[in-house]
Image (cartoon, rainbow, N blue to C red):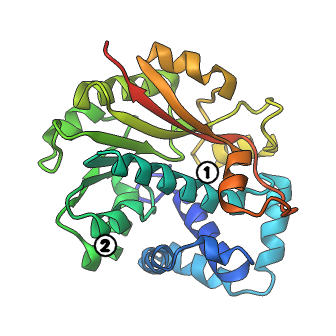
Amino acid sequence: MKENKASITAYTVLQGIMYVAKRTKYKDLVPKDMKDLGEKVLSCSEEGQKRLAQLEKKGFALGVKIREYIFLPGITLHYILRKRAIEHRTREFLKAGVKQVVCLGAGFDSLALRLAEEMPDVNFIEIDHPDTQQFKAQALQESQRENLHYLSIDFTHQNLEDRLQECTGFTPSLPSLYICEGVTMYLTSEEITHMFTAIHNLSGTGTKFLFTALEPQDSPRNNTRKILDYYLKLIGEPIKWTMESPELEAFLKQQKCKILSLDETDQFRDMFLKGNDPVTLHRGEYLAAAEFERR
């Protein structure tokens, strides 16, 4: 990510969700409060305003199809399916007794804010790079809740464990869920291991971790085009870490975790789409839920 600018990926994901809400037959997948908050966030910066204006142009839908064909087939719809799956799993954990949710690399996502309003007895913390977080916090300041806290961190230069321990809004003793959406692929293997270790040290045995990960480029479960790697390097957000989904359980054991669920494209379809819908879906990113065991 370029310095002093919000993540291009954060803008792209939110624009994709707004496109689904405004221009496609899948608009009902985007809750009204998610759509309204998304518009607020995009309206708060010059880049965001440009992205909103693009949505109204006649040729934008064709451009989406062309970009998907070149880079990532089905990715635009995937953004909202991924978010709906994360919210579904998060609500399950909250119903089971989680009282603190920590969102790592929250980007322009609105889940924490929406749930904080709905569940005032749960503590929420959003952690992200300061250059991305500043635009979001400014846009949503009127919607701020006492049980939602913002903490800035650059995962590649700062220590997650130290930063959270310094956060007055963080309570180590609360049953906690950590969410990491669309972040792990931008971290090195060492940074991934550090993240797992830090979470366990911060919140202990029984802590839940909900995160997304990518299949390797050459995996038969990945329909991403090779050219995407070059594009991400060009914008300063290269892919650094991937994990074959069949190997995830063994990897989690190394991190002293047990796997609770693994949602891939077929599960997203089953949860949120009609079974006979012929739409092309993105394959290559999955959502995993894990629980930390005793060390």
The kind of residue on which mark 2 rests is Gln
List x then y, in percent, for residue 155: 38, 38
Rendered position, 127 above or below 15: above
- How many residues crowd around disc 1 within 10 Å: few (fewer than 14), some, or many (20 or more)? few
- State how far apart marks 1 and 2 are (Cα): 25 Å
Rendered position, 197 above or below 31: above
Which residue: 19% across, 41% down? Answer: 174
Q: Earlier in the sequence, mark 1 or mark 2?
A: 2
Which residue: 22% across, 40% down? Answer: 164
List x then y, in percent, for residue 288: 54, 37
Q: Quadrant of residue 50?
A: bottom right
Numbered label attached to residue 53: none
Q: Nearer the viewer, residue 186 or 179?
A: 179
Q: Nearer the viewer, residue 32 or 17?
A: 32
Residue picked out by circle 1: 235
Rendered position, 114 above or below 204: below
Side of 273 relative to 45 (left or right): right
The kind of residue on which mark 1 rests is Ile
Side of 175 relative to 194 (left or right): left
Rendered position, 266 above or below 239: below
List x then y, in percent, for residue 245: 66, 28
* Count of all numbered marks drawn on residues in the image: 2
Furthest residue to the left? 168
Q: Nearer the viewer, mark 1 or mark 2?
A: 2
